Image (spheres, grey):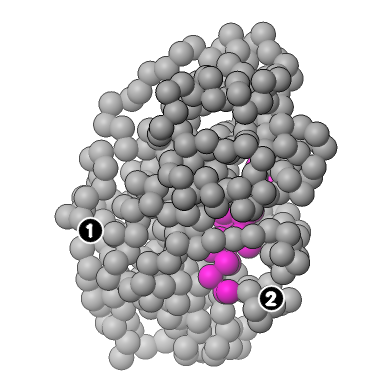
Amino acid sequence: MVVAKSWIMVQHFEGVPKPEDFKLIERELPPLKDGEVLLESDFLSVDPYMRPYSKTLLKDGDIMIGSQVARVIESKNPAFPVGGDYVGYAGWTTHFISDGKGLNALPSNWPDHVPKSLALGAVGMPGLTAYFGLLEICKPKEGDIVMVNSAAGAVGSLVGQIAKIKGCKVVGSAGTDDKLTFLKEIGFDEVFNYKTVSSLAEVLKKASPEGYDCFFDNVGGKFADAVLQQMKDFGRVAVCGAISIYNDSVPSTGPYIQPYILFKQLRMEGFLPARWDNQKAEGEKQLLEWVAEGKLKYHEHITNGFVNMPAGFMGMLRGENTGKAIIRI
């Protein structure tokens, strides 16, 4: 008999998630039926989307949403042999039973020297978000100037590097000087600490006096307001996230953005990576090649121990991670 440990959301978050919003439970899993497999999680992901999506997808007492790299430890389904590694979406749990639907095998050409945890990061959902969001919405051209906020995060750090691969100048912002060092190491041209500058408008102007062709927005709020004012005519804006306002109890207000969009003739589009599910294999193949060739560098912020999942999640929302936030069991 296998005992699964799981983290449930005790109650919907009010403002910033707190430790008492989570509870660790244990439950015995039933014997497998024909066609089922038992998987054990090796790595789990914590991501910003969990904060807003928990509000719409979960009710009090549900297992927290999320994905994992998991290994098959028992199988009654010949399509999923014991020892196989898959990305699952079973939430914050150590073990789970699946009929195979929704399990995604790691690409067959996965190199031995590449950590399998990257299936949750640079070669997983964050990587695909960066790849398709930048290339399909911003459509950068060689010589374009690209602005990326939350640039040291799981998505932003990849966006900047992909833009450099495409021949762009890249400006990035982050919240600590150590993160700025990381951004310079992976090829960003200009970087700044948004927490310490006296004026966002001034630092954006200094980093690119001629303005910005593309803006990959992970933050929203006042930061986005400032960048929109410095976009070039016919600029493109990919709205990937709004982490600066996810924890707001009262909706925030900002400048009216329509004049900037209108008179600069901007294209501004929100997106979810699932839009390109039919091109997922293409994206994974390219990302894995870039990682294996050393063209796409990655950094993982590892929290050890399933017991520390809430701490890892809350720390990620506070911006404590550089690169992808991962929980290693």
Majority secondary structure of magenta residues: helix
Residue 84 position, x and y percent, is: 58, 84
Q: Residue at coordinates 20% horizontally, 63% vertically from top-left? A: 23
The single residue placed furthest to the left in the displayed view is: 20
Q: Is residue 146 above or below residue 206?
A: below
Quadrant assignment for the N terminus: bottom left
Around disc 1, counting alpha carbons within 10 Å, would you say few (fewer than 14), some (14 to 19), or many (20 or more)? many
Amino acid type for the residue under numbered disc 1: Phe
Q: Return the residue at label 2.
A: 110
Q: Say which quarter of the image contains residue 10.
A: bottom left
Region rendered in magenta: 115-133
Q: Is residue 327 visible?
A: yes
Q: Is residue 1 above or below residue 178?
A: below
**Label 1 to label 2: alpha-carbon separation:** 35 Å
Around disc 2, counting alpha carbons within 10 Å, would you say few (fewer than 14), some (14 to 19), or many (20 or more)? some
Contact between marks 1 and 2 (CB within 8 A): the answer is: no
Left or right of 303, for residue 260 = right
Residue 120 position, x and y percent, is: 54, 63
Residue 177 position, x and y percent, is: 46, 45
Q: Return the residue at label 1.
A: 22
Left or right of 294, for residue 77 = left
Left or right of 89, for residue 3 = left
Quadrant assignment for the C terminus: bottom left
Q: Residue at coordinates 40% horizontally, 34% vertically from top-left? A: 195
Q: Is residue 155 visible?
A: no
Q: Nearer the viewer, residue 48 or 32?
A: 48
Q: Residue at coordinates 37% horizontally, 67% vertically from top-left? A: 303
Amino acid type for the residue under numbered disc 2: Trp
